[in-house]
Image (tube, grey):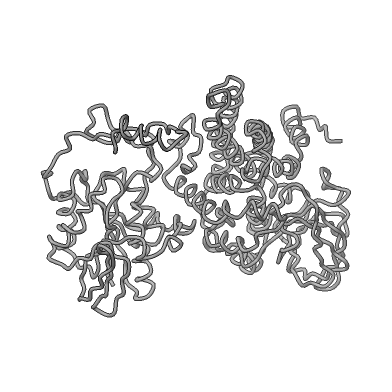
C-alpha cells in the first residue's frame, strides 16, 4: 500500500516551514514504525503499550515547546500541534498519553513550578523516565471542577492530602501526579504527588470501550503526607488548572484532525478498490457525497488549527478560540469516523482497519477536556458575556 | 575520523512519477523528496562509526536550493555540517566531478555514498568518484569495519560476497546490510531544533558543462488487466496465438 499522504486540499503545506514539515514527518515516521504495527493488538487486549513511553521521550514528543534547559526541544506550538496530529492518526490513546505528559504535567510544572521542581521533574518527564498524570476531575465534579472536595491541611513542613480523582489518563503507571486540591481556606492549589508516598494509590479503570490502549484510573489520597516544597508556587485558583486545559485542548484540536485524516484516507482508498455493481464504489454519488463532505470538513478544521497555531505562537490564542477548535475538530472527526465506517461496510467494524478504533476513541475525546456541550457554553459566555454554566 | 556522506535528494519511493510535456525532465509537482534510501544506510553507518571512533560527519549534495530540507534532515539525524554544491545534477559524470573537486580540496578519511540513487538508478557516481579521486572503491558494500587507518569492506558480487582490506581513504557505495533498516534513525525533536544552528554551506559549482543531455524519458506501459482462464488448453491457446509468448 502507498505511504500515507495527508489530505492538503488548500495547500496548507505551503504555509508550513521546512522545520514544521520535518517535525511532522519525523512523528509520522515514528508512528509508522513503532505504533501502527502494534496498536490494534494493544487496543484489542485493552493493554497500555508502556514500552512506547521511553520511545516517545527519545523522539521528543514530551514537552516539545519547553525550553532545552529543562529537557524540552524549544519548538513552537505549531510543531506541538503537528506532532499531536500525527500521533492521533496512530491512536487517540497514545496521543492522550502525550497530551497529559506535555500539557497537563510538564506545562504546569514549567509555568508555575519552583526552580527546584522544574529541575527535579521536567528532564525526567521529557525523557519518559517519569510518566505523569493530572488530577482535576472527581467522581462528583466533572464539568464543575471548582466544586472539588479533594483537600489538604498543613502539618509542619508537609501537607496532608485527602480525596480522590477519577478518569485520570496514565494514572495506573504514573510516577508523578499534578493534583489540584483545596487548602484550608478553600483555595485551589497544584501539588506534585509522587509514586511511593504512603496512602497514594492508583486503581485502574477497567472495561472501557474507548481509549483501550491508554491506561486510565483513579488517584486516591488517604492522608498522603506531601512536602510543602511539592506545592506549585506560581499560581493558584481554578484558572491554574484551566490554563493547563487550554494547552491540552490545543493539542486535541490537532489530534482529532489526525484521526479524521486517517479515517478519510482509509475510506478514500477503500472506495477506489471496492467493486460493487461492476465499478468502484468511489464512482457512486452517495459515496462521493460522504468523501466530499469529509475533505471539506477536514480542510476547514485544518484552517482553524493552522490559524490557532499562529495565535498560540504569538501568545494570543484565547480559551474561547481553543474551545471552538477542540469542539469543532472532535465533532467532525467523530462524524467522519462514522461515515468512513459505513463506507467500509462490514470490514469497517473489524480491527483490520483503524476506523472503528478511532471512532470508539473519539467518544472519549468528545467528552474529556471539556465536554462537547461545555465548550458551547464557553463560546456562549465569550460572545454574550452571560454565564450559562449555572 | 573525518567522514563524508554524499546525499542525493530523490522522490519518495511511493511518489507517482510523471515527466513534463516534452518528456525531458521530471515533473516534480506534488512529489515529496527524501534522502536517497541507499545514502541513508551510508549516513547511518557514518553515525555508527562516529560513535565508535569519534570524529565529524559532513553531508554533501550536488543540487539546487530545493535540496536543502534533505540536508537539514541529515543534520537533524546527526550529521555535523552540510555542504551543497549549487548545480543541477544532470548526469553522473558532472555530479562525480563536482564531488571530486570538493573532496580533493579537503581531507576525508572515508567517503560514503549509496550504491545508487533511486531516481535514475544509474549506479555510476560512486565508481566514477573513486576513479576520479584515484581511491579504492567498494560497491554494494554490506559490511565495513575500520581499524585505525585501515578498513575491511565486504561488497556483493554475482552469487556471493567479496571482502577487501586496504588503507583509508576509501570510497564506498553502501546498501542495506551496511546497517539494517531497524538501525535507520528518525530525527528527534531536539535534533531538528539543533539542526537549525548547524552549518549548511553553499559552494558554487566548478564544472560548467554537462557531459550528456536527456533527450526523452518514457514511462513503462501500464499493466493490462488480468485475464482469468478456465482450462490449461485455453491458456496454451492464448499464450500461443494471442500473446505469442510460446
| Quarter of image, res A15 | top left
Q: Quadrant of the C terminus of chain B?
A: top left
Q: Position of residue B170 (x, y in %)?
A: 21, 69
Residue found farthest to the front? B233
Q: Quadrant of the N terminus of chain B?
A: bottom left
Q: Position of residue B107 (x, y in %)?
A: 20, 68
Q: How many marks?
A: 0
Image: B234 above or below A132: above
Residue found farthest to the bottom? B148
Residue at image location 22% in from the left, 76% down from the top: B165
Is there any visible trace of residue A324 in the rendered image?
A: no
Residue at image location 27% in from the left, 66% down from the top: B155
Q: Position of residue A64 (x, y in %)?
A: 55, 54
Image: A48 above or below B213: below
Q: Nearer the viewer, residue B94 or B216?
A: B216
From the viewer's perspective, is B232 left or right of A257?
left
Q: Position of residue A256 (x, y in %)?
A: 63, 40
From the viewer's perspective, is A324 left or right of B225?
right
From the viewer's perspective, is B33 left or right of A53?
left
Q: Nearer the viewer, residue A88 or B182?
A: B182
Is there any visible trace of residue A266 in the rendered image?
A: yes
| Quarter of image, res B45 | bottom left
Amino acid at each position: 500500500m502507498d505511504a500515507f499522504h495527508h489530505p492538503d486540499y488548500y495547500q496548507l503545506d505551503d504555509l508550513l516551514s521546512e522545520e514544521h514539515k520535518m517535525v511532522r514527518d519525523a512523528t509520522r515516521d515514528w508512528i509508522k514504525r513503532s505504533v501502527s504495527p502494534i496498536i490494534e493488538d494493544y487496543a484489542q487486549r485493552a493493554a497500555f503499550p508502556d514500552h512506547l513511553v521511553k520511545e516517545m521521550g527519545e523522539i521528543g514528543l514530551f514537552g516539545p515547546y519547553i525550553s532545552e534547559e529543562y529537557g524540552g526541544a524549544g519548538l513552537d506550538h505549531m510543531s506541538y500541534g503537528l506532532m499531536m496530529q500525527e500521533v492521533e492518526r496512530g491512536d487517540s490513546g497514545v496521543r492522550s498519553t502525550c497530551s497529559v505528559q506535555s500539557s497537563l504535567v510538564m506545562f504546569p510544572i514549567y509555568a508555575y513550578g519552583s526552580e527546584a521542581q522544574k529541575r527535579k521533574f521536567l528532564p525526567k518527564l521529557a525523557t519518559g523516565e517519569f510518566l505523569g498524570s493530572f488530577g482535576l476531575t472527581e467522581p462528583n465534579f466533572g464539568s464543575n471542577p471548582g466544586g472539588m472536595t479533594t483537600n489538604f491541611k498543613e502539618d509542619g513542613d508537609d501537607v496532608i492530602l485527602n480525596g480522590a480523582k477519577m478518569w485520570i489518563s496514565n494514572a495506573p503507571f504514573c510516577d508523578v501526579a499534578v493534583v489540584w486540591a483545596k487548602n484550608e481556606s478553600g483555595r485551589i492549589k497544584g501539588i506534585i504527588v509522587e509514586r511511593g508516598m504512603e496512602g497514594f494509590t492508583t486503581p485502574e479503570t477497567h472495561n472501557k470501550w474507548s481509549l483501550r490502549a491508554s491506561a486510565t484510573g483513579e488517584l486516591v489520597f488517604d492522608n498522603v503526607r506531601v512536602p510543602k516544597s511539592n506545592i506549585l508556587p506560581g499560581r493558584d485558583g481554578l484558572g491554574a488548572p484551566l490554563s493547563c486545559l487550554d494547552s491540552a485542548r490545543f493539542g486535541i484540536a490537532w489530534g482529532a484532525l489526525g484521526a479524521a485524516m486517517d479515517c478519510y484516507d482509509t475510506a478514500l482508498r477503500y472506495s477506489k478498490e471496492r467493486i460493487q455493481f461492476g465499478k468502484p464504489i468511489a464512482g457512486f454519488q452517495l459515496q462521493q457525497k460522504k468523501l466530499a463532505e469529509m475533505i471539506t470538513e477536514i480542510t476547514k478544521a485544518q484552517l482553524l488549527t493552522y490559524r490557532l497555531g499562529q495565535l498560540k505562537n504569538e501568545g494570543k490564542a484565547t480559551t474561547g478560540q481553543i474551545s471552538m477548535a477542540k469542539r469543532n475538530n472532535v465533532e467532525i472527526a467523530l462524524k467522519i469516523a462514522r461515515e468512513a465506517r459505513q463506507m467500509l461496510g462490514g470490514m469497517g467494524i473489524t480491527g483490520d482497519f483503524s476506523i472503528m478504533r478511532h471512532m470508539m476513541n473519539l467518544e472519549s475525546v468528545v467528552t474529556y477536556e471539556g465536554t462537547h456541550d461545555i465548550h458551547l457554553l464557553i463560546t456562549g459566555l465569550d460572545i454574550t458575556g452571560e454565564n450559562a454554566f449555572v | 575520523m573525518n567522514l563524508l556522506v554524499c546525499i542525493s535528494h530523490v522522490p519518495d519511493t511511493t511518489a507517482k512519477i510523471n515527466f513534463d510535456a516534452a518528456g525531458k525532465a521530471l515533473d516534480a509537482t506534488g512529489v515529496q523528496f527524501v534522502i536517497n534510501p541507499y545514502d541513508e544506510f551510508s549516513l547511518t553507518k557514518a553515525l555508527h562509526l562516529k560513535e565508535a571512533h569519534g570524529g565529524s560527519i559532513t553531508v554533501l549534495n550536488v543540487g539546487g536550493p530545493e535540496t536543502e530540507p534533505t540536508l537539514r534532515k541529515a543534520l537533524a539525524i546527526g550529521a555535523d555540517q552540510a555542504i551543497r554544491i549549487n548545480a543541477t545534477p544532470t548526469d553522473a559524470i558532472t555530479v562525480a566531478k563536482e564531488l571530486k573537486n570538493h573532496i580533493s580540496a579537503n581531507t576525508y578519511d572515508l567517503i560514503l555514498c549509496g550504491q545508487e540513487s533511486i531516481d535514475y538508478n544509474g549506479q555510476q557516481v560512486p565508481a566514477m568518484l573513486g576513479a576520479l579521486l584515484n581511491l579504492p572503491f567498494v560497491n554494494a558494500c554490506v559490511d565495513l569495519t575500520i581499524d585505525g587507518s585501515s578498513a575491511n569492506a565486504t561488497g556483493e558480487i554475482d552469487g556471493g560476497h567479496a571482502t577487501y582490506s586496504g588503507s583509508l581513504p576509501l570510497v564506498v557505495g553502501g546498501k542495506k546490510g551496511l546497517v539494517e533498516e531497524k538501525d535507520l534513525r528518525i530525527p528527534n525533536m531536539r535534533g531538528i531544533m539543533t539542526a537549525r544552528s548547524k552549518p549548511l554551506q553553499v559552494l558554487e559549482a566548478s564544472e560548467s558543462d554537462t557531459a550528456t543531455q536527456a533527450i526523452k524519458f518514457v514511462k513503462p506501459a501500464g499493466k493490462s488487466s488480468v485475464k482469468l482462464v478456465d482450462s490449461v488448453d485455453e491458456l496454451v491457446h492464448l499464450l500461443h496465438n494471442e500473446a505469442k509468448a510460446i
